[in-house]
Image: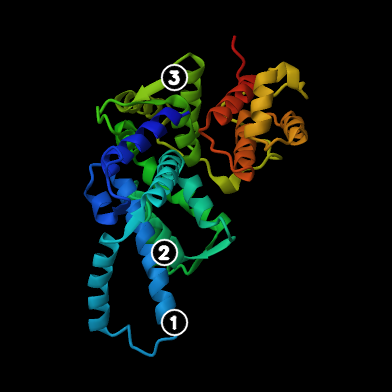
Amino acid sequence: MLEQETELITSAIKHRILVGGQHSAHVAVKDILAADIPHPIKTLFRADVEATLMEELHRHRRDSRFNYDHPEVKSLQHQMNSVLVLNYTYTQDEFLHRLDDFVNMMINYLIRPQWTLTNMLFEKAQSISSAEVLKILRCFGAFEYLKEIIARYIQDKNISTFNKKDFSNFVRKAEGEYIRRKTGDELARVMTPMFEFLDFPKTTSNKALPIRSLIKFFEDKGLTTILTRLESENAQGKKELTQLDLSELLEDVRRTSGAFEVERLEEKSDSSADAKDTTTPIPFPALLSVDSLFDEADKRRFVKKIFKQDEQAFNTTLQSMSKLQTWKDASKFIDEIFIRNDVDPYSTEAVRFTALIQQQYYPKK
């Protein structure tokens, strides 16, 4: 979906840091921070080195009898740490490897901040300390309001740990309260970091983003009324929106449907008589055959790139999806597949797989 933008951003940063390959074999953090590259990438590199330094200092101090907590020592250590971080050097291979990871991570965070944060925080455990949450938040140099919401909650409520479910529910609810009071223009401006990052290196201030990416952004926040409108625009052939276009669309949605209300995760219930999908999708045709849904070329690509050469898993997935009655459920099921199989949701194969499934719920008239 955003492969072209990802490659362009990565290539431009490489050129500006390595000067077309004429740079030395090492890259200093101070050179990265001084370069004309997106601020969120600088933040990730600095946080990466700071974490490495803290681990090294922790190992060194673990069995030490010296008082490193003395106020004067801590002040001097802070100054030393700044100098050490700025003068840390990556090899070119290390720099390039991290750059690819950081650009992809940042695009995922900008498009699906709640999903990305939650999965990063709870990648290895179902519970995490608040101190670790705050440390990981320092890696992200975008959506400062979201970081402030989380940090303020931890401080005000004296939270010591989070489990995955509670964190996800809290962020959905807290960000929902923040967004509910916004006008369409204000909500569009909240998304400025996304538009600016994906506009690099041209900085035209008029970057148009794919509607599919915008759908993912608002799906991440549970803003159903906006999702319905964007799906409609997409079905009518509108594929991209500038920030100004989006501002006007969001304000029209607000005037028509009222304040931006977030769907609450904990209130979902398939058995409830009132539990209805506001997008009124068409049920997925029962147990479609593979041949009727994908051609042979698509099937080979999906089995290879999404299902790790497991054709049986591919067929079983389609059978499971045939029982899902709404696009909302199907979309979440697809997300679970991508997470389980470590698939980039914005890769060519993932985008096409999603689009072909979606067509079964929103067939062309």
Residue denoted by label 3: 239
For the residue pair 108 and 145, the one nearer the viewer reads as 108
Number of the label disc, if any, that sits on residue 149: none
SS for tag 1? loop
Discs 2, 3 touching: Cβ within 8 Å? no
Front: mark 2 or 1: 1
- Identified by mark 2, the residue type is Ile
Residue designated by label 2:
154
Can residue 183 be seen?
no
Residue 132, image x, y percentages: 45, 64
Q: How many circles with numbers are drawn on the protein?
A: 3
The Cα–Cα distance between marks 1 and 3, rounded to whole angstroms, is 56 Å
Question: Which image quadrant is residue 186 in?
Answer: top left
Q: Distance between the residues labelled 2 and 1?
A: 28 Å
Q: Which of 118 and 93 is in front in this view?
A: 93
State the SS at label 3: loop
Read off the residue under disc 1: 62
